[in-house]
């Protein structure tokens, strides 16, 4: 590994869009990882002592996907692609922090993807609880007391209205909508 470099608050360790072939291990201090889209900055995370940042550049030739900026005085040790390649021959165990960082990124990405898919499914379906209280003689013959049914529907005011159209003449209809719990 190369010598540790000192970064003052506001200093860039990595700039979004740059083509680099190195990563850093934070020895002290902390950095923010941010993505810039036009004038908007989105903070993706904070990394501190012992964490690896920029590890993808050790394995691929692609522009940096985010910037890494010191938020306090930060000491970081630089690892170049060539040095990592040499270490795989000399001391394979020294490569483990970088491989762990990539696996953790993959694990986090999988978790985020699953959460996004579940959220998308939840937003597609809404549970509607309808209660029917008979108010006419005909309704009492069909349903002598209050009845409650639950349905999963695509969220829309129109779908709820279609369900209760025509029933209001014979029933007092109560409508409650909610999203089903995750995993159900």
Image (cartoon, rainbow, N blue to C red):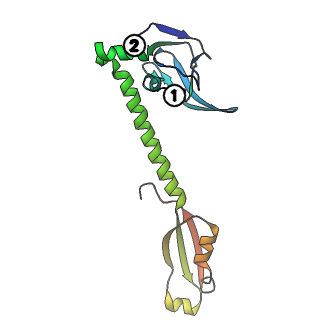
Which residue is pictured at 45% across the width and 18% down the height?
49
Picture coordinates of residue 133 (x, y %)?
55, 81
Q: Indicate whether 96 appears above or below 28.
A: below
Q: Quadrant of residue 65?
A: top right
Q: CA distance from mark 2 to mark 1?
A: 19 Å
> Is residue 62 or residue 133 the one in the foreground?
62
Q: Which residue is mark 2?
A: 83
> Is residue 70 or residue 95 the one in the foreground?
95
Residue 42 horizontal side relative to residue 20, left or right:
right
Q: Residues within 10 Å of mark 1 (few under 14, many from 20)?
A: few
> Is residue 154 or residue 165 the one in the foreground?
154
Q: Quadrant of residue 17?
A: top right
Q: Residues within 10 Å of mark 2 (few under 14, many from 20)?
A: some
**Label 2 vs 1, first from the N-terminus:** 1
Q: Indicate whether 60 appears above or below 176.
A: above
Picture coordinates of residue 69 (x, y %)?
58, 20
Classify mark 1: helix, strand or loop: loop
Residue 82 horizontal side relative to residue 123, left or right:
left
Classify mark 2: helix, strand or loop: helix
Q: Indicate whether 125 appears above or below 117.
A: below
- Looking at the rendered image, the quarter that the N terminus falls into is top left
Picture coordinates of residue 70 (x, y %)?
57, 18
- Looking at the rendered image, the quarter that the C terminus falls into is bottom left
Which residue extends farthest right?
A: 39
Which residue extends farthest front?
A: 61
> Is residue 149 or residue 60 the one in the foreground?
60
Q: Which residue is mark 1?
A: 62
Which residue is pictured at 50% across the width and 48% down the height?
116
Dot 2 and dot 1 residues touching (CB under 8 Å): no
């Amino acid at each position: 590994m190369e010598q540790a470099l000192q970064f003052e608050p506001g200093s860039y360790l990595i700039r979004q869009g740059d083509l680099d072939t190195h990563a850093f291990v934070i020895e002290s201090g902390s950095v923010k990882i941010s993505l810039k889209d036009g004038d908007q900055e989105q903070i993706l995370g904070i990394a501190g002592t012992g964490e690896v940042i920029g590890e993808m550049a050790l394995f691929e030739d692609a522009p940096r996907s985010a910037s890494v900026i010191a938020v306090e005085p930060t000491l970081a040790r630089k690892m170049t692609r060539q040095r990592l390649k040499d270490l795989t021959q000399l001391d394979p165990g020294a490569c483990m922090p970088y491989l762990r960082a990539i696996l953790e990124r993959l694990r986090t990405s999988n978790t985020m993807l699953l959460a996004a898919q579940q959220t998308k499914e939840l937003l597609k379906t809404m549970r509607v609880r309808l209660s029917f209280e008979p108010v006419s003689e005909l309704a009492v013959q069909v349903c002598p007391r209050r009845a409650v049914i639950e349905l999963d529907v695509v969220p829309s005011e129109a779908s709820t209205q279609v369900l209760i159209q025509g029933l209001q003449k014979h029933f007092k209809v109560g409508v409650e909508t909610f999203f089903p719990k995750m995993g159900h």
